[in-house]
Image (spheres, helix red, strand yellow):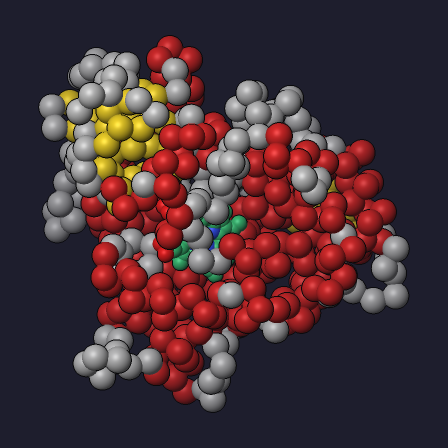
Amino acid sequence: MVGKIPPGPRNAFLSGLLPKDVSKQIDFYYKLIDKYGDYVRVDVMPGFTFYLIVDPAGVEHILQTHQLKYRKPNRFNNAFGVIAGNGLVTSEGEHWLKQRRLMQPSFHREALVSLTDMMAANIQWLLSEWDQLPDGAEIDIAHEMMRLTLKNVGMSLFGIDISDQSNKIAPNLIRAFQHARYKLNAPFSLPEWLPTRENREFKEARAALNEVVQDIIDTHRRSASTHDLLNLLISTQDADTGERMTDEQLRDEVITLLIAGHDTVGAALSWAWILLSQNPDKRAILNSEVRHLSSRYPLWADMQNMPYVKQVFDESMRMYPPAWGQPREAIENDIVEGFEIEKGHMIALCQYINHRDPRWWSEPEQFKPERFADGSEKDRPKVAYFPFGGGSRMCIGNHFATMEAMLALAGISQRYDIDLISNESVQMDLTFTLKPKGRVSCRLRRVA
Ligand code: HEM
């Protein structure tokens, strides 16, 4: 290769540079780029090196223009595969392509529009529960948003209401993610069969999640539902072999969609309410946009007249991208913007850092939805903002998420103001999706 070797630390593991705790990972990345620049090579220990790339041209190269030279790392697929098996997020190659082609039509924008009335009605279901509470009642908005997104994903994709499973799913998902994150980041991890406390707790969490998934599949098989994605997955036969999906593959796809489909949007909406509460002037703009529609609740067709709703969603994901980092592995040697990338090594891309880069975002720590007004993207590099990733592995649920989130922001703002109770800043949980840490206590104030 004829490029420059990116600068960076050597023997990062032995010299104690690597953060022990995932909560420090973004700080660690900031220290690296402050010292070494947009391309950093971190030699963790012999045989384990990764590159950190924050130059948007480099991100575009890896995710889009030269994506065939990269794949999701085995380390990532193995770590999250202990939860999601060989589902769409953690699979590769022919198998991934076959599954992606099968599911893609269900996620086209046009196909999803028919689900938006149900999504809007689900928001009214949540509001009617809130209406039972006294005005000014305290709620945990993060928990409420997860209940809503579980209901949407369950009813849209599997034809089943699973919102009442939230208390079972949430704690077990956290435990399972902690284990996967440990496997992803630790230079060595103990095999799953060893009877350690870590392994035992993880297996209990995984068993509980599997129970939920099996219940979804069994309930669906007993129902007459024929129009949802799960029905497509159950009934499709391979064009060459005539085989149907095995029970194991079906489980892997259902748990993947269940997790990817609710946890991400739930996180994005939680941050949006936090930011709106902290920025009453921006909330007033949103409210004036949605509250003129007072005689009925907002539907998808109304969204084209509500540009600020979309800007609030985009800006919330700029500041707190639910997928805050994205790993890749080089499958051949490559030169990225003059820097050598060696085959077999991992590359860390980090939405959180790119989305707050002061070179393209003025006052990046400020919540300013207006920066996403029509035409504003011409003022920044193409891949300065990539909450849904890019290239062929781009999020399959991006339209689903956008429709659901916009309807929720509009429908809820029409009826309630949501105020954070504490003035203290909300901490981030980086274990998997970027979520607010712990309970997010808010006061609900009815406005209509
Ligand atoms: C705000 C919400 C969401 C965000 C920020 C988000 C983000 C992402 C990102 C960044 C990726 C690419 C990961 C990579 O290439 O390494 C991805 C992939 C994926 N997402 Fe989403 N997602 C969201 C919502 C959803 C929803 C609602 C669904 C399903 C209903 C979904 C299902 C998936 C699946 C199955 C993949 C894997 C696609 C593939 O590799 O072919 N996501 N998501």
* Left or right: 443 as drawn, with respect to 424: right
Image quadrant holding the N terminus, namely top left
* Left or right: 45 as drawn, with respect to 174: left
* Left or right: 42 as drawn, with respect to 395: left
Residue 336 picture location, percent across and down: 31, 28
Image quadrant holding the C terminus, namely bottom right
Please give the name of the residue rendered at 19% of the width and 29% of the height, measured from the top-left corner.
342
- Classify 236 as above or below 172: below
Occupied quadrant, residue 253: bottom left
Q: Is residue 15 visible?
A: yes
Occupied quadrant, residue 3: top left
Residue 249 picture location, percent across and down: 26, 69
Please give the name of the residue rendered at 52% of the width and 31% of the height, measured from the top-left corner.
381
Residue 238 picture location, percent across and down: 25, 78
Which residue is most to the front?
A: 2
> Which residue is at the front of the view, 248 or 134?
248
- Classify 15 as above or below 181: above
> Which residue is at the front of the view, 208 or 354?
354
Please give the name of the residue rendered at 21% of the width and 79% of the height, measured from the top-left corner.
240
Please give the name of the residue rendered at 85% of the width and 59% of the height, measured from the top-left corner.
293
Q: Is residue 79 visible?
A: no
